[in-house]
Image (spheres, rainbow, N blue to C red):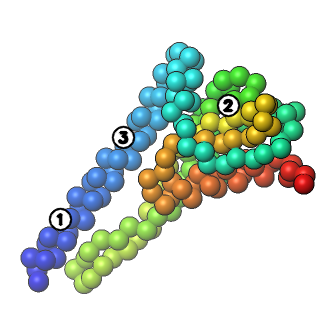
Amino acid sequence: MEILLGVLLVASLIVIAVRKFSAMANVTSHAIAIALMKRNPRRAYRFADRLDIPIERREAVAADEARQLIQKLAHCSSVKAFTVRHTQLLDDNRVLMFTSVKYSDLEVMPGRHGMVSYDVKRTAFHEFLIQYNPATATFLINSDLFTTTHERLHKNEFTRSITSLLTPARA
């Protein structure tokens, strides 16, 4: 029984180490991408091309309204719970946004007398391409592919925050 607890403890420590390393790599890559774009703004176009997963699509959006929202987003410091770490206006119809959001997570580890759980504070980093296609009057929010439930929830929350600023489409 004690051997099993020892194995579970080692396995949980490995999982925690992998999570910490992954989080550190995410922060580092986010910071490096921002630094590279500040030095050479043309890199933002290549980075934006990688954000090809549509998170939200709105039809029949007025051009003036969409462009005003894009201009507003290009100069904001936060969007509800999301802190905007960097924005880059690619043109009148597209803005690239680097964001972070703090959230609570539940960490579960084996202890001496069973499983032990506790709350931990985490920070997630996300990138979004907000764009308007005037030819089809379509407003789009793209990002990269989410890999966890938390990422999916964050991306959907960000999208709801942005699209709530648009006037509902008329039938």
Q: Secondary structure at mark 1?
A: helix
Q: Residue at x 80, y 37 (%)?
A: 137
Q: Earlier in the sequence, mark 2 or mark 1?
A: 1
Q: Which mark is residue 135?
A: none
Indicate the quadrant where residue 120 lies: bottom left
Question: Of the residues shown, which amino acid type is indicated by label 1?
Answer: Val
Q: Secondary structure at mark 3?
A: helix
On the rendered structure, is 14 left or right of 97? left
Question: Mark 2 highlights which residue?
Answer: 95
- Foreground disc of the pair 2, 1: 2
Question: Mark 3 highlights which residue?
Answer: 25
Q: Residue furthest right?
A: 170
Question: Mark 1 highlights which residue?
Answer: 10
Name the foreground residue: 165 vs 6: 165
Q: Secondary structure at mark 2?
A: strand
Name the foreground residue: 34 vs 52: 52
Q: In which quadrant of the rendered image does the N terminus lie?
A: bottom left
Question: Of the residues shown, which amino acid type is indicated by label 2?
Answer: Val
Question: Of the residues shown, which amino acid type is indicated by label 3?
Answer: Ala
The image position of residue 92, as x and y in percent, is 76, 24
Q: Are the residues at dot 2 and dot 3 in contact (C-beta closer than 8 Å)?
A: no
Indicate the quadrant where residue 89 lies: top right
Q: Residues within 10 Å of mark 3 (few under 14, many from 20)?
A: few
The image position of residue 111, as x and y in percent, is 25, 76
Q: Residues within 10 Å of mark 2 (few under 14, many from 20)?
A: many
Q: Mark 2 to mark 1: distance in Å?
A: 45 Å
Q: Mark 2 to mark 3: distance in Å?
A: 25 Å
On the rendered structure, is 162 left or right of 116? right
Q: Mark 3 to mark 1: distance in Å?
A: 22 Å
Q: Earlier in the sequence, mark 3 or mark 1?
A: 1
